[in-house]
């Protein structure tokens, strides 16, 4: 439940993972990721997000860490919920980093050379959420994500042309 007593799918999804067992981009375990994601999901003002970011944790300079693919379904679930524009934008930007990044050298050494593929696969599970964002929200970032994530190139190109035509 969130601070208002509502059940949120994103918070439920957040609880599915053992974040403490995952490596984070900050050099610690991912144990702190749930607090950051929860704060971002529940924030109603920009001031409430101060000190909470996913930058440097899921990725650093487009280099991905073990926590990244686990965060994707949480972010997608959050995009189905009422979020302020600044949080929605942060989540969309993060998804773009995750589908265009590549595994950090330390993750490759740890046997996880394909984290970006795991992220793309996870985004594909919520592809229509990203299409909805492209149609009604941050068109450019959502379209950039879809360019990497949608395996149906013809659908993507048609959708992009229609979104551009409608002025979004």
Image (cartoon, rainbow, N blue to C red):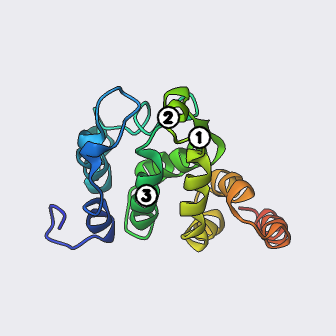
Mark 2 or mark 1: name the one nearer the start of the chain.
2
The image shows residue 3 at horizontal and vertical percentages of 15, 61
- Regarding residue 48, the answer to whether it shows in the image is no
Q: Residue at x 60, y 66 (%)?
A: 124
Residue of label 1: 113
Q: Residue at x 59, y 40 (%)?
A: 113
- Where 148 sits versus 20, above or below? below
Residue of label 3: 75
Measured in 3D between alpha carbons, the distance from the residue under mark 3 to the one under mark 1, in whole angstroms, is 22 Å
Task: Estimate how packed mark 3 is, as few (under 14), some (14 to 19) or many (20 or more) residues with alpha carbons within 10 Å.
Answer: many
Task: Estimate how packed mark 2 is, as few (under 14), some (14 to 19) or many (20 or more) residues with alpha carbons within 10 Å.
Answer: some
Left or right: 133 with respect to 165?
left
Viewer-proximal residue among 123 and 157 = 123
Measured in 3D between alpha carbons, the distance from the residue under mark 2 to the one under mark 1, in whole angstroms, is 6 Å
- Determine which of the numbered discs, if any, sits on residue 107 in the image: 2
- Determine which of the numbered discs, if any, sits on residue 27 in the image: none
Q: Secondary structure at mark 1?
A: loop
Q: Residue at x 60, y 69 (%)?
A: 127
Mark 3 or mark 1: name the one nearer the start of the chain.
3
- Could you say which quadrant of the image residue 41 lies in? bottom left
- Where 145 sits versus 31, above or below? below
């Amino acid at each position: 439940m969130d601070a208002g007593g509502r059940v949120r799918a994103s918070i439920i999804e957040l609880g599915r993972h053992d974040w403490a067992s995952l490596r984070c981009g900050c050099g610690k375990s991912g144990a702190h990721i749930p607090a950051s994601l929860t704060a971002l999901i529940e924030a109603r003002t920009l001031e409430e997000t101060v000190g909470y970011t996913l930058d440097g944790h899921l990725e650093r300079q487009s280099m991905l860490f073990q926590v990244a693919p686990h965060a994707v379904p949480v972010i997608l679930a959050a995009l189905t919920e009422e979020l302020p524009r600044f949080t929605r934008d942060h989540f969309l930007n993060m998804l773009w980093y995750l589908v265009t990044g590549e595994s950090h050298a330390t993750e490759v050494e740890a046997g996880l050379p394909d984290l970006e593929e795991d992220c793309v696969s996870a985004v594909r599970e919520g592809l229509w959420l990203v299409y909805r964002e492209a149609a009604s929200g941050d068109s450019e970032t959502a379209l950039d994500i879809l360019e990497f994530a949608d395996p149906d190139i013809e659908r993507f190109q048609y959708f992009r042309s229609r979104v551009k035509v409608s002025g979004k």
